[in-house]
Image (cartoon, rainbow, N blue to C red):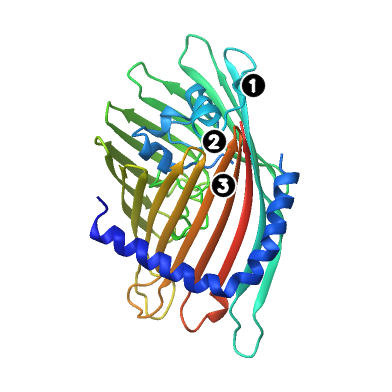
Amino acid sequence: MISFYEKILLNTTYILFINKLAKLKVILVNLLLLVITTVLITTDSKAEPYLAIKNNLKCIACHVNPNGGGLRNDFGKIYGQGLLPATANSFDTAKLAKITQFLSIGADARFNGNYQKNDKSNNEEETIRQGFEVSSAQFYLHLQIPASGLSFYLDQQVAPGSAINREAFVMYNFEQGSFIKAGKLFIPYGLRIEDDSAFIRQATGMNFDNSDNGIEYGVNFAHSTINFYMANGTSQASNDDDSFLYGLRAEYLFTNFRIGTSAALNDGERQIQMLNLYAGSQLGDFTFLGEIDFLSLEAPNTATNQDITQIATLAEINYQWQQGWNFKVTAEYFDPNTDINNDQQTRYSLIGEYTPISNIQLRLGFRFKQDIPQKPQQNYDQVFIQSHFYF
C-alpha cells in the first residue's frame, strides 16, 4: 500500500506535469526527431542508488569503488548485461572489460539533446536554448596486485573538452571487508544520485564534478557501513595545512528499508558545516528515496555579519513497469537562506528510462524549475533526451 503522503506527492507531480505539458506540444513534435537522431548516432559512470535500494544491496555489490559509481565489478557487469535491459545480448560484454585476471577496464558515455525555455525578464523576451552535447564520457581502470589486498583505481573523464582526472587512488582491502584508500576521490556524502544538477548535490558541492585529495577509511558490516574521511576541502587542489574537510557517512540496511546520515565540516577560511539524513525503501515495483540537507555557512564579510542556514531536499519515486523500463518522478526544494522569506526554489522532474538491450539506455525527461519572483529568468521548462552507453 502507498502511504497518504506518497499519494499526495504523486498526484501533485502529475497535475503539475499535465499543466506544463499543454505548453510543450510543439516542443514534443521537434523532440521526436531528436530522439530518432540520438538513437542512430549513439554508440559516466554515475550511480543510480534506486537500483541498490530496489535490490537491498550496498553500492559495493556492483561497483569496484565501495562508495558506488564508476567501474562495475563482475556482479555489476552481469546485472547491466542480463537483468537491467529488456533483452540481453548473447555476447558477454564483460569479456571486453577483463584484460587479465587482475586488470579490468570500463567506460560510460552520455549524449544529450536539450530544449530549454526560460521565462522573460523585465522587457526581454523568453530565452530558448536547444542543441546536442556530449554530456560526459569516462574511462575506468582497475589494477589489483595479486595476494596483497592492494589495488589502483582510475576514473578519467575524456569528454567533453580536455581530459580531467576524477578519481585516482590506491586502496587496501582488509579481510573483514573494510578498506582504506588515499588519493583523489569522491567524498562519501548522502545519496550518490546520477543528476549533478539536483539541489542536494549543487548546494553541498558533493557531486560527480567535485572530487578531492584525501584519505578515507570504510568499515563494512553485514547490514551497515561507516565511512570516515579527511580531505583538503571540496574544490581545493591544495591545502595550507591550517584547515581540512572532515566527515563521516553511516548507513544501515533493513529488509526493505535503509536509512543513512552524513556530516561534514569544511574548516576553511569560511567554515561550512553540513548534515543530512537520507532514506530509501522498496514496495513492489516502486522504489522510494529521499534526502534532506542542512548547511551552515559562516558569515561572509558583510555589514550584517550573520551566518547563513540553507536547506535542500529531494524526494524520488521510481516505478519499474517491466524489465528494461523505469519511470522516475522527483520533487526538489532549496532554501538558500532560511532567514529570508520567499527566496525558495523548487524543481520537478518526470523521466522515462528504457534499456532495450545490454549496454545502452535511452532517457526522455521533463523538468520544471521555479525560482523567486524577482528572478523570473531563472524559471525554466526543459525537455531532454539522452543516450547512455556503458560497459
N-terminal of the pair, mark 3 or mark 1, is: 1
What's the CA distance linking mark 2 and mark 1? 15 Å
Viewer-nearest residue: 324 or 217: 324
Residue at point 49%, 59% (across, down): 350
Residue 340 as seen in the image, left or right of residue 134: left
How many numbered tags mark residues here?
3
Instruction: Please determine whether, in this image, residue 191 is positioned above or below residue 346.
Output: above
Label 2 SS: loop
Name the residue beneath numbered marker 3: 237
Res. 86 mark: 2
Name the residue type under label 3. Answer: Ala
The part of the image, by quadrant, that contains residue 174 is: top left
Q: Is residue 273 visible?
A: yes
Which numbered mark, 3 or 1, is in the foreground of this view?
Answer: 1
> On the rendered image, what quadrant is the C terminus found in?
top right
What's the CA distance linking mark 2 and mark 3? 43 Å
Q: Could you tell me residue 207's position as x and y percent?
A: 50, 49
| Residue at the bottom extreme, as displayed | 123
Viewer-nearest residue: 42 or 320: 320
The part of the image, by quadrant, that contains residue 154 is: top right
N-terminal of the pair, mark 2 or mark 1, is: 2
Label 3 SS: loop
Res. 184 mark: none
Viewer-nearest residue: 170 or 125: 125
Name the residue beneath numbered marker 1: 91
Q: Could you tell me residue 299's position as x and y percent?
A: 38, 69
Instruction: Please determine whether, in this image, residue 354 is positioned above or below residue 75.
Output: below
Name the residue type under label 2. Answer: Ala
Which numbered mark, 2 or 3, is in the foreground of this view?
Answer: 2
Name the residue type under label 1. Answer: Phe
